[in-house]
Amino acid sequence: MQTQVAIIGAGPAGLLLGHLLRAEGIECVVLERQTGPYVLSRIRAGVLEQVTVGLMERLGLDARMKAEGLAHDGFHLADGKRLIRIDIAGLTGKQVMVYGQTELTRDLMEATAGRGLEVIHEAADVALHDIESDAPFVTFRKDGAACRLDARLIVGCDGFHGPSRKAIPASAGREYERVYPFGWLGILADVPPCNHELIYANHERGFALASMRSHARSRYYVDVPLAERIEDWPDDRIWDELAIRLGPEAAAHITRGPAIEKSIAPLRSYVFAPMRHGSLMLCGDSAHIVPPTGAKGLNLAASDVHYAAEALVRFFKAKDPDGISGYSDKALARVWKSERFSWSLTRLMHRFPEDGAFERAMQVAELDYIAGSRAAQTSIAENYVGLPV
Ligand code: APR
Ligand code: PHB
């Protein structure tokens, strides 16, 4: 098989890129290890920045998002005493769209056949070859048969554990990493949310987040030590903990219900640089991870894809390679700012086991500063709605 761009991974990054390239008449094939239903069973965050909404609009795949998504004008930070509202619309003139990553991925997946985007699911043993040449190729197995896909460029959209980043020689890149001493225990339930906006809480018992997928479906999180087991968290224990950590105002409006999904996810900050090596470009989680505080993961994948699509269109249509050679610097400039914001919001809103009285006093002072300063709130708001691409 031969194509112009081989895309590894059919998560949101790979599907978005595939659709953008097809819309420009560039040939591509997407190789995905899992089945479509498996990809859709992964529950991820659900707050979209303008960059992500804009790409769906550009593709004409925004109808369901516009009908079912919830546009939010603000969110709250709770510090155990009060709710500090960050008026993102008032401070930045922008909103965020609450719409699950699962739903966005479903919209992209359902449009593949109609738009002639070829996605090969259950592609096993995907391996990248000759990425330092102008004729890279990918080998894989499909239904037991050995297959080969030749391309001019390969884009790795295969998440943190995929083979793309690992194909880059260690001497050609650098890893930056911070692993956090806790994970987020998430619960999804078909109950109305406790507030019409999100609440991120820093309580003496730990972090909590009240989020939602719709007016009838809520998503909540509490942070737990990494060694914790999901079996030790029956639904009632999670609801009790949420009620304490989110504070009495939110607790009064919590509706409890059976979990339809429950899982523990570790928190990590990670960047691999550069994001291009030879004929291989990386997008999304394959190149970087942010902790979920601030919901930047999917949005960063979308901004990478925006830059990558721009570079690839320039390469194939104008025969100009400068977009490809400048891709990594351009993408990383935005990646690092989102890494900083996600890390700083994580630092502010969690109780770290190694923290002493001084670190705690710094959190109290910072939350108090934010509560009283329009400048501080504006800084948080402009990062939350998403920095420009
Ligand atoms: N071969 C083919 N596909 C693979 C392989 C492989 N060896 N390994 C992984 N993949 C696929 C995964 O099955 C998955 O469908 O690559 C896809 C990667 O998707 P995501 O992990 O969702 O990553 P990305 O598309 O970059 O989206 C970023 O996802 O994890 C969240 O926080 C993150 O919300 C952000 C978004
Ligand atoms: C979610 O709804 O799952 C969610 C929302 C905001 C975050 C993280 C996760 O910061």
Image: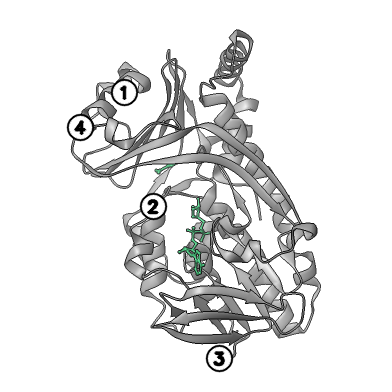
Name the residue beneath numbered marker 4.
Answer: 256
Nearest the eye: 132 or 300: 132
Q: Are marks 3 and 4 in contact (CB under 8 Å)?
A: no
Numbered disc in front, either 4 or 1: 1
> SS for tag 3?
loop
Q: Position of residue 64 (x, y in %)?
A: 34, 63
Q: Toward which corner of the image does residue 290 lie, by quadrant?
A: top right
| Residue 118 is at least partly visible in this image | no
Residue name at image x 43 percent, y 31 percent:
227
Q: Is mark 4 within 8 Å of ligand 2?
A: no
Name the residue beneath numbered marker 3.
Answer: 1
Name the residue beneath numbered marker 2.
Answer: 99
Q: CA distance from mark 3 to mark 4?
A: 52 Å
Q: Amino acid at mark 2?
A: Tyr
273 relative position to 108: left or right: right
> SS for tag 4?
loop
Residue name at image x 53 percent, y 20 percent:
353
- Placement of 215 over or under 322, stated as above or below: above
- Outermost residue, left direction? 257
Point out the tag, 4 or 1, that comes first from the N-terminus: 1
Q: CA distance from mark 2 to mark 4?
A: 22 Å
Q: Amino acid at mark 1?
A: Glu
Q: CA distance from mark 4 to mark 1?
A: 12 Å
